[in-house]
Image: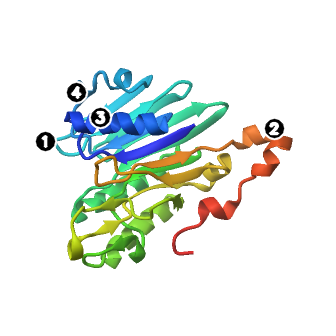
Amino acid sequence: MSCIIWNARGLGNPKAIHNLHRLIADEDPSLLFLCETKLVSGQCRNFKYTFGFEGCFVQDCIDRKGGLILLWKDPLKVEIKSCSAGHIDAVIDHNLRTWRFTGFYGCPTVEGRVASWQLLQRLGSLPELCHLPWLVGGDFNEVLYDHEKKGGRPRSLSQMQNFQEALDHCCLRNITGMGEFFTWANKQLGSDFIQERLDRYVCTLAWGQLFPNSRCQHLNFYSSDHRAIKIMLGPSLVWVRKNSNRARKGRFHFEELWATDEE
């Protein structure tokens, strides 16, 4: 199975819907998190049927800003635990595995991202959920390190540190993606061209151990200014135990999933 996160930059026009169709046809995700949809639930009433999903949860946009959607297919069992303008938090059950997925959208303003990191830390401290293996993915609207931005003014050190501290508080580690490094581009020319790595997956150690053969890939833009990001969930430890002879050849190399870009 696979999960895709994508900042669609608005889904209120036929071209955007066409590109979403293309993404789903190309990659066939089991779980799809969309942010900046700029839609409300009434506009998404038929989304799960239109795009071939069995479940759909919508967090409305506010004044044509933001908006989140989580879509999923059978046989995934998805229980939504909480939501806000910046997140959808869910518990996933599939093939004897129970884990947690949070689709996250960091505030686009510098001032607002303080509240985003506070939200992430609160989610990481929930006693009824913090024991579950946890995957978080989305557009964080922030970079972790200097080299995750190319062009424009250098990122403030304090902004990056706030992001790093929020992840550390939640015991979340960066998952390295294959493909083009930068996930966002401003589509300007010459000296005005800026690229950043704003979109990513992070996970806890327990999630990495549950899905030891997972692989993350940076996909195309599909006419957005953000790349879609896909993670393929490899065989779990449950599967490995039941199929130990077959699974040995593909055993998880710990450093591949957990390698951060600064290492």
Question: As drawn, which residue projects farthest toward the left?
Answer: 63
**Quadrant of the image containing the N terminus:** top right
Residue 148 vertical placement versus 66 (above, below): below
* Front position in the image: 76 or 48: 48
Q: Amino acid at mark 3?
A: His
Give how far apart the Cα atoms at labels 3 and 2 are. Answer: 41 Å
**Callout 3: 10 Å neighbours few (<14), some, many (20+)?**
few
Residue 45 is left or right of residue 71, and the answer is left
Residue 42 vertical placement versus 141 (above, below): above
Residue at image coords 43%, 40%: 89
Residue at image coords 60%, 31%: 94
**In the image, which is nearer the foreground, mark 4 or mark 3?**
3
Pointer 3: what residue?
18
Q: Secondary structure at mark 2?
A: loop
Q: Secondary structure at mark 1?
A: loop
Pointer 4: what residue?
43
Percent position of residue 147, x then y: 41, 75
Percent position of residue 101, x then y: 49, 42
Pointer 2: what residue?
243
